[in-house]
Image (cartoon, rainbow, N blue to C red):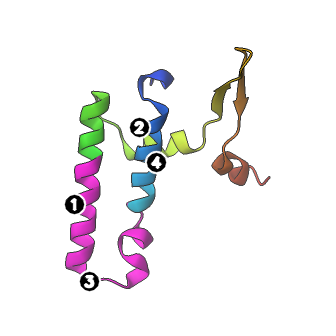
Amino acid sequence: MEKITDVSIENKKAFINLVCRLSPENLACDGEISEPEIDLRYAQCMREWRALEKQVGRKVSEEEAEKWAYQPVRLVCNNGLTTEKENSKTKTAKGK
């Protein structure tokens, strides 16, 4: 089981961004670019992914990063109380 706190929110956001950039339609710019350009974009994303993995000190799967996009975000209020707020992807997935 993964530890929720082992990756910072900033790094989770970076992984989620890379997951989006690695989707076929985004990689290929909806079919507007050539195969060599797609390969270059993919290689750049994977270099960034490996650099982030080095930063967090472990491997992160694409599936794990996708899960983070749907997890509630924990917020600490000024009074020190912790609350949870659903992120926009969670709301969309639930049909809100």
Lateral position of residue 72 relative to residue 55, left or right? right
Front: mark 3 or 2: 2
Q: Which amino acid type is shown beneath numbered disc 3?
A: Ser
For the residues bearing labels 3 and 4, Cβ distance under 8 angstroms: no
Q: Secondary structure at mark 3?
A: loop
As measured in the structure, the alpha-carbon distance from the residue carrying label 1 to the one carrying label 3 is: 14 Å
Q: Earlier in the sequence, mark 1 or mark 3?
A: 3
Identify the element where label 4 is drawn. Answer: helix
Image quarter of residue 8: top left
Along the polypeptide, which appears first: circle 4 or circle 1?
4
Check disc 2 and give the amino acid type.
Asn
Give, as a three-letter code, the residue at label 1: Ala
For marks 1 and 2 on the same chain, the one whose residue lies earlier in the sequence: 2
Place of residue 72 in the rendered image (x, y in percent of width and height, measured from the top left): 65, 35
| Label 3 – label 4 distance at C-alpha | 25 Å
Q: Amino acid at mark 4?
A: Ile
If you read the primary sequence from the N terminus, does the residue marked by circle 3 or circle 4 appear first?
Answer: 4
Which residue is identified by label 1? 43
Is 75 situated left or right of 33 in this image? Answer: right
Q: What's drawn in magenta, residue-wise?
A: 22-48
Q: CA distance from mark 4 to mark 2?
A: 9 Å
Check disc 3 and report the residue beneath it: 34
Q: Tell me which residue sits at (26%, 53%) in the image.
A: 46
